[in-house]
Image (cartoon, grey):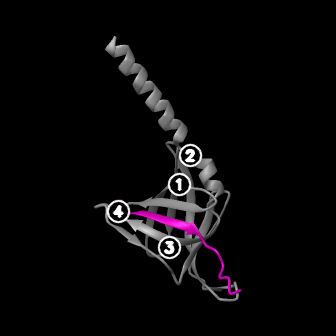
Amino acid sequence: MKLPFSLLSSLIFMVLLSCNQQNPKEKLAHLNGYWEISKVEMPDGTVKEYTISTLVDYIEIKDSVGFRKKVAPKLDGGFIINDDAEKITVKIENNTLNLYYSTQFDSWKETVLEANEQQLVVLNKDDKKYTYKKFEKFNLE
């Protein structure tokens, strides 16, 4: 009797786990926009919190290709922008959303763990987990 119960328990666990995972195409739909880093979780479990950042990541992807660039928010709601950008190629592999970056100096991959209207979480090759929040323009009123 224990075998069928444990088998049933395992099956239920797998179904619940798979239902909890976000579809990679849903994640992709939320990538575009301005993202502000909020924390980095290191492989050893330590966490570095960011309360304010002078730079924001702007991501733009269309038809699985795009770019990411660092922009500096201004008090009037605009941004200071330079010409530096990291090219991005998006691939869905094994039901996972991967971002392949390239510059003239380097190339690397990040895996999108979560992406919704308010939060973006990516994992890099060094097992560092970066959490971003949607950037909100300065409100001086």
Q: Is label 2 in a helix, a strand or a loop?
A: loop
Residue carrying label 4: 126
Residue 140 counted in the magenta span: yes
Confirm whether the magenta stretch covers residue 22. no
Q: Which mark is residue 114?
A: 1
Q: Residue at x 60, y 69 (%)?
A: 67
Near mark 1 (Cα within 10 A), the count class, few <14, some 14-19 or many ≥20, is many
Question: Mark 2 or mark 3, which is nearer the start of the sequence?
Answer: 2
Check disc 1 and give the amino acid type.
Glu
* Above or below: residue 89 compared with residue 16: below
Circle 3 SS class: loop
Residue 1's image quarter?
Answer: top left
**Residue identified by numbered label 3:** 103
Q: Is 62 positioned to the left or the right of 127 in the image?
A: right
Say few, some or many: other residues with alpha carbon within 10 Å of mark 3 (under 14 / 14 to 19 / 20 or more).
few
Marks 3, 4: nearer the viewer: 4
Q: Main secondary structure of the magenta part?
A: loop
Q: Which mark is residue 22?
A: 2
Helix, strand or loop at label 1? It is: strand
